[in-house]
């Protein structure tokens, strides 16, 4: 990973949110500001941008990190089941309720409750959630008494809640309760500086899981990855890297033919292809980064033997020396090369 990349980590040291763009630095700064507070946080961004990763960073870097982090997707559970899941139920409150059961909000006591896709909640559940935020208490389904709860509340949505309010689908009073602090995560196509550290991270991660070896990307494959619009954001990139490492086989070099067709042969006039064309316009601005990374990988693969490196990548030794000088690439000692995580 690039030395300039920013990586948010939880208490176990696992990387959570990676990048080097101004957006990632801003998000990291916001996480540091709110991590020890109890104020609700609303995280917004397209699907696949890493909203839950940021929520986990807030929790595991903060004062509540020793307590539970409980996450639920409000759009993935049918509405008639979600109320019981969130708030719990009393025995006999409905068919199949054979015992008292605490809800997920109660299970997060002392810690953090993360509700993803809060914009998908029904109006009745929105009203119950507002009560939790205002009074710090819940009422189980089928019970009359309330129970106090001590939880940090973080929510997330890919929807524009202001628009949902205007169209009568979301409560304005709940919106203002949720967004005491808002962390907005821009889509990957708007923070393209983060592509390289993310590619490095996922290549290292899945390389270890697959065969424990070192995988590299051919420069043409890297160009295509950088030119693609990534409508699925980081999640799509993560899946693509894993797929490429599986397909490239024992050669361990990812080439354009290993990429998904939508990336290796973009076509059409839709928004995604238009974004890809705009990204391609910035190719020359990013080209130096491609070349540096490609040369470093080739040198590392050849144990920093310049003659062998030049032969492998199809350059003369003089051309290789010129590129190394131009990009300020120095040859480390063998010992350094073995421990580098470039």
Image: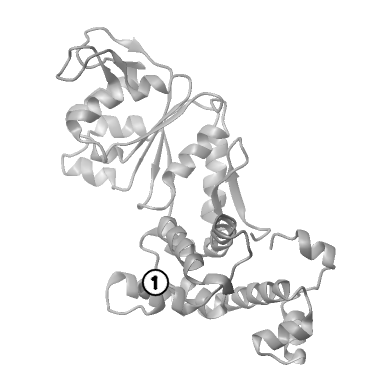
* Quarter the N terminus occupies: bottom right
Please identify the quarter of the rendering in which residue 329 is found.
bottom right
- Does residue 190 appear in the picture of this structure? no
Which residue is at 51% across, 36% downward? 58
Report the side of 70 relative to 174 (left or right): right
Mark 1, Cα crowd under 10 Å, few <14 / some 14-19 / many 20+, is: few
Residue 139 locus on image (x, y percent): 27, 14
Q: Say left or right for 71 vs 96.
A: right
Q: Residue at x 43, y 59 (%)?
A: 239
Q: Is residue 63 something one can see in this rendering?
A: yes
Residue drawn at point x = 73 percent, y = 76 percent: 302
Residue beneath label 1, please?
A: 260
Residue 175 locus on image (x, y percent): 30, 34
**Identity of the residue drawn at 35% across and 32% down:** 178
Q: Quadrant of residue 127?
A: top left
Q: Nearer the viewer, residue 46 or 56?
A: 56
Vertical order, 326 against 86 (above or below)? below
Q: Is residue 126 above or below residue 95?
A: below
Q: Quadrant of the image for the C terminus?
A: bottom right
Question: Which element is circle 1 on?
Answer: loop
Residue 173 occupies quadrant: top left
């Amino acid at each position: 990973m690039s030395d300039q990349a920013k990586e948010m980590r939880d208490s176990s040291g696992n990387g959570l949110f990676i990048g080097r763009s101004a957006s990632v630095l801003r998000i990291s700064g916001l996480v540091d500001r709110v991590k020890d507070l109890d104020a609700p946080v609303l995280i917004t961004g397209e699907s696949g941008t890493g909203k839950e990763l940021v929520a986990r960073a807030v929790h595991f870097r903060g004062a509540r990190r020793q307590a539970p982090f409980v996450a639920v997707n409000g759009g993935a559970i049918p509405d008639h089941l979600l109320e019981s899941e969130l708030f719990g139920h009393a025995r006999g409150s409905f068919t199949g309720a054979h015992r008292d059961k605490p809800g997920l909000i109660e299970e997060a006591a002392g810690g953090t409750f993360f509700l993803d896709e809060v914009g998908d909640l029904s109006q009745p559940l929105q009203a119950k959630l507002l009560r939790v935020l205002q009074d710090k208490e819940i009422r189980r389904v089928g019970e009359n008494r309330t129970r106090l709860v001590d939880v940090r509340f973080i929510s997330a949505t890919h929807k524009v809640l202001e628009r949902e309010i205007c169209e009568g689908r979301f409560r304005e009073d709940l919106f203002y309760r949720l967004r005491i602090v808002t962390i907005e995560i821009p889509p990957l196509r708007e923070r393209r500086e983060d592509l390289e550290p993310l590619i490095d991270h996922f290549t290292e991660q899945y390389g270890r899981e697959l065969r424990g070896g070192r995988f590299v990307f051919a420069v043409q494959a890297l160009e295509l990855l950088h030119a693609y619009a990534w409508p699925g954001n980081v999640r799509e990139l993560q899946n693509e890297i894993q797929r490429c490492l599986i397909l490239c086989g024992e050669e361990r070099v990812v080439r354009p033919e290993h990429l998904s067709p939508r990336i290796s042969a973009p076509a059409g006039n839709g928004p995604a292809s238009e974004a890809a064309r705009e990204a391609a316009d910035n190719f020359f601005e990013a080209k130096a980064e491609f070349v540096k990374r490609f040369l470093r990988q080739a040198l590392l693969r050849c144990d920093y033997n310049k003659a062998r490196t030049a032969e492998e990548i199809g350059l003369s030794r003089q051309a290789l020396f010129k590129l190394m000088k131009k990009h300020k690439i120095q040859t480390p000692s063998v010992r350094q090369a073995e421990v580098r995580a470039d």
